Image (cartoon, grey):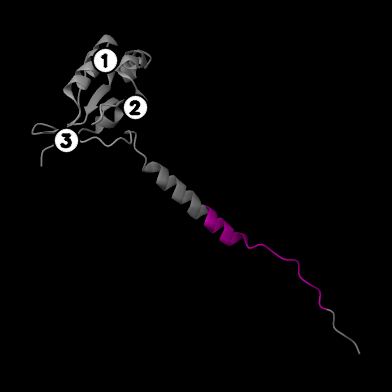
Amino acid sequence: MNFVVRKRRAPTIIIVSLVDILIILLIFFVVSTTFKKDQPEVQINLPESKTATKRPAELEHAIVSVDQNDAIQLDGQSVGVDELEAAVRDLPADRKSTLALQADKKASWGAIVKVMDALKLAGVKNLPSFMREEK
């Protein structure tokens, strides 16, 4: 009896499907990172104003935010009132000139005045504030 001996083929990896998966993952990561905003993640309820307008330059500002619990943040990083003046002085001149204030409408007026005072002592001359359009 003669048995036919078959030779086994070497296993192959199908590269086409792996490349497809890699491209899909690459697209996912690129798209998901473009959704990140420069705004801090703090929820701030801005006061409404009849004269407020939306400007695209608002995203270019360095932002000092005061939330409803009077916590102060500079570009998303928590700072104290006494540390705020030194932190603003350490900012580059172009970031310091575009500094803006964003305060929650439930924040205490005393905390906002302390922040504005610290910013004036740090050399900020023009301090715009953000507000929401009235509906």
Q: Residues within 10 Å of mark 3 (few under 14, many from 20)?
A: some
In the image, 73 versus 16, the foreground residue is 73
Q: Quadrant of the C terminus?
A: top left
Residue 43 image-quadrant placement: top left
Write down the region rendered in magenta: 6-22
Nearer-N-terminus badge (2/1): 2
**Farthest residue in the bottom direction?**
1
**What number is the disc on residue 1?**
none
What amino acid is found at the position of numbered circle 1 in the picture?
A: Leu
Q: Measure the alpha-carbon separation of dots 3 and 2.
A: 19 Å
Q: Measure the alpha-carbon separation of dots 1 and 3.
A: 23 Å
Q: Residues within 10 Å of mark 2 (few under 14, many from 20)?
A: some
The reply to whether callout 1 and callout 3 are in contact (CB within 8 Å) is: no
Query: Which residue is the site of mark 1?
Result: 119
Disc 3 secondary structure class: strand
Residue 108 image-quadrant placement: top left
Query: Which residue is the site of mark 2?
Result: 75
In the image, 4 versus 25, the foreground residue is 25
Q: Quadrant of the N terminus?
A: bottom right
What amino acid is found at the position of numbered circle 3 in the picture?
A: Arg
**What number is the disc on residue 132?**
3
In the image, 46 versus 112, the foreground residue is 112
**Where does the image place residue 4, in percent across and percent down from the top left?**
85, 83
Q: Is residue 13 above or below residue 95?
A: below
